[in-house]
Image (cartoon, coloured by chain):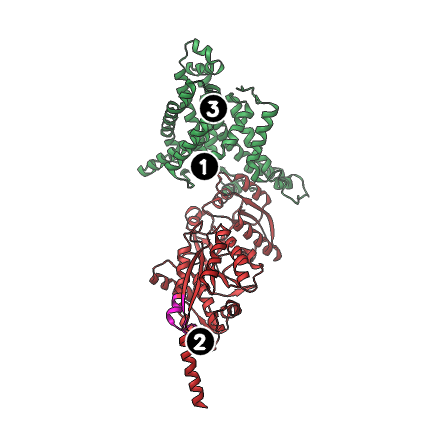
Chain colours: A red, B green
Amino acid sequence: MKKLLLATAAMALCASAASAEDVKMGVLLGFTGPLESLAPAMAAGAEMAMKEVSDSGKLLDGDTVTPVRGDSTCVDAAAATAAGETLVTSDGVKGILGAMCSGATTAVLQNVALPNGMVMISPSATSPALSTVEDNGLFFRTAPSDARQGEVMADEILEKGLKSVAVTYTNNDYGKGLADSFQKAYEAKGGKVTISAAHEDGKGDYSAEVGALASAGGDALVIAGYIDQGGSGILRGALDTGAFDTFVFPDGMVSQTLQDNFGSEINGSFGQLPDSEGQGMDTYLTMAKDAGFDGTSAYSGASYDGAALMLLAMQAAGSTDPNVYKDKIMEIANGPGEKIYPGDLAKGLELLKEGKPIDYEGATAVNLVGSGEAAGTFREIEIKDDKIETVKYR
Amino acid sequence: MDVINALVAITNYVIIPATAYGAQLALGALGVTLVYSILRFSNFAQGDTMAFGTGVVILITWGFQAMGISFGPLPTALLALPFGIVITAALLLGTDRVVYRYYRVTRASPVVMVMVSVGVMFVMNALTRFLIGVDQINFDDGARFVINARQWREMTGLSEPLTLRSTQLITVITALIVMVALFWFLNRTRTGKSMRAFSDNEDLALLSGIDPQRVVTVTWIITGALATIAGTLYGLDKSFKAFTYFQILLPIFASAVVGGIGSPVGAVVGGFIISFSEVGLTYAWKKVATYLIPGWEPEGLVQLLSTDYKYAVSFTILILVLIFRPTGLFRGKVV
């Protein structure tokens, strides 16, 4: 009996060694277009995870992983769909990391991933609309939805005891989405939004906008805009007319420019931005540095995590079939089990092979909520002594 | 107390910004009106002349700052202004020599001249961006406030803030000085009178021995000065961005037309009409209403138009005036 088992095991080993295959993974990012400067570091992050898994030789039957790049652009849904279609049908990828922008992601998901049953993990699409889109359990994202930032911001404001605020947002999908989700969250928790007014970027004069905001009043002004654009003009106008003393800054406003230009005038104002800290991020940054790219670039860590999640899920499911391993992604991301950080992928693969559970933390402390999107950690900041100071992570 | 608070709110959010903005528009409209009455075409390049002039002033301001020259509590840009005017005037004279003179000599119709000025506008626009870039530039380096919100609250104990920025005061004072000087020049000096004569009747002026080239030259120099001053004041008060001057071309033309194009007094009055309409119609009167009518807090914002429609206000006024009173308030002329 013992001999038989041994022989079976040996045969299985031989068989599996013989069946080691090359798993292709799509990296579908906006290599051209308005966010092309972010794409290289994101792709490098994703490919680093794939290489790590491939080099370990521990994936399934010693499978190797080969990344295949596709250009999702950012604004051209047709081009993104075509690139996604190519990855799936002619390259035969087993999973797609992407796409990059919310619009392109929606297009690829509906036109390519759903019909072909392909798993997609977007590291950077933040539109709240993607939370409710029909996805057959195939779509995930390692970036937090803007709806989440709205909630975090609402909590933060209420904790400071501010019961009514005025909101101004830059007139595009980002600004509108964030302002709406914030208003919903804030009002559900008992706050009052006195006005939610759009502002156009690139104007010289924002005194009329500031006048309307001031007339509506409120304990603070939420500026869901861009610091290099209209957000700056609104802030300057509001400060100059004494309309508001306290401001709330979402991610588009928190930057060095804010501190340099306004630091001394906005003490006591606060804000938040998606950001990660801790062991995972530190390790990731070191690894990125060794690999020769900038890991601090936005969504780079999330790309690594997206790729790693798919590969670990394959291992857990024992299959590279997207329709099989898609069910394992949430389990791996949320634990329980041993925590896996960047650089530990080999260990993760091994544990999974032994049938032990893991909790993938990765670079961005991955924790998927709802229909499979990152809960996201946000860095809460406050302006103290003319400087942006980190208060805490939440 | 509530009445005073209401007045303070109106002053802070309507009267002060609209006065400063009106002064900037008035200076721009004066330039348009002068070119229209003497050179007989609508100069679409006025906005970008302002941008160019301001760009030059900013470059010189940076030079001064690098040399450690400052103007005390006043912005250094005011020191740089004369140099900016010289360079802008030189550019305008050069443009006239290369472009406009040909069409003037061939007696091209006004509409052709307008198209020519549109071409000049694009070139100047590109030139400005090439010179100083497209980024937002703040070059105001003097004292920021005459009265700031905190001082005001401590001084009066009112809940409504009132602020007066130094750039707003500088704008109004400079505009006043420039307007007085211009009206004195047009009405009292020989050159000014010859310009008015040229404007009233070109042939008669030529017969009476007025040198047309001299009139044209002086007109361009004054236009350059007005554009540079208006642009710099706008940039100081708000912020400089190469293409925002193209956007204020519409309010500037509306100002000139409302007052009566060709009439300098009309340009000034028109500037203030447009600025007060723009700011007043898009202001949310909720706060003021709450102060004035006790026991009533309006649900909405009591805002006639969203601030997005600011330029639509000047456009509507422009259309209405052109339909019902094309000569404007002060009986300007229509070619």
| Residue depicted at 57% across the width and 23% down the height | B328
Nearest to the observer: residue B4 or residue B202: B202
Q: CA distance from mark 3 to mark 1?
A: 24 Å
Percent from the top left, x then y, of residue A261? 42, 46
Whichever of labels 3 and 1 marks the residue nearer the N terminus, that label is 3
Q: Please tell me which residue lies in front, A15 or A390.
A: A15
Query: For residue A351, which numbered disc appears in the image?
Result: 2
C-alpha gap between disc 2 and disc 3: 80 Å
Q: Callout 1: residue from which chain? A: B
> On screen, B148 above or below A1?
above
Amino acid beneath label 1: Phe
Residue displayed at 37% across by 22% down? B97
Looking at the picture, how far across and down is residue B197, in whole percent?
Answer: 47, 13
Q: Residues within 10 Å of mark 2 (few under 14, many from 20)?
A: some
Q: Is residue A57 magenta?
A: yes
Label 3: state its secondary structure.
helix
User: Same chain, marks 1 and 2?
Assistant: no
The answer to whether residue B313 of the structure is visible from this angle is yes
Magenta-tinted stretch: A51-65
Q: Is residue A23 left or right of residue B4?
A: left
Q: Badge 3 is on which residue?
A: B112
| Residue at which label 1 appears | B243
**Whole-Å distance between the Cαs marked 1 and 2?**
60 Å
Which of the 4 image quarters holds residue B139? top left
- Residue type at tag 2: Leu
Name above or below for residue A385 compared with residue A61: above
Q: Looking at this rendering, what residue extends furthest in the top direction? A: B208
In the displayed structure image, the side of residue B317 where residue B60 appears, left or right: left
Q: Chain of mark 2?
A: A
Location of residue A10 in the rendering, given as x and y in whole percent from the top left corner: 41, 83
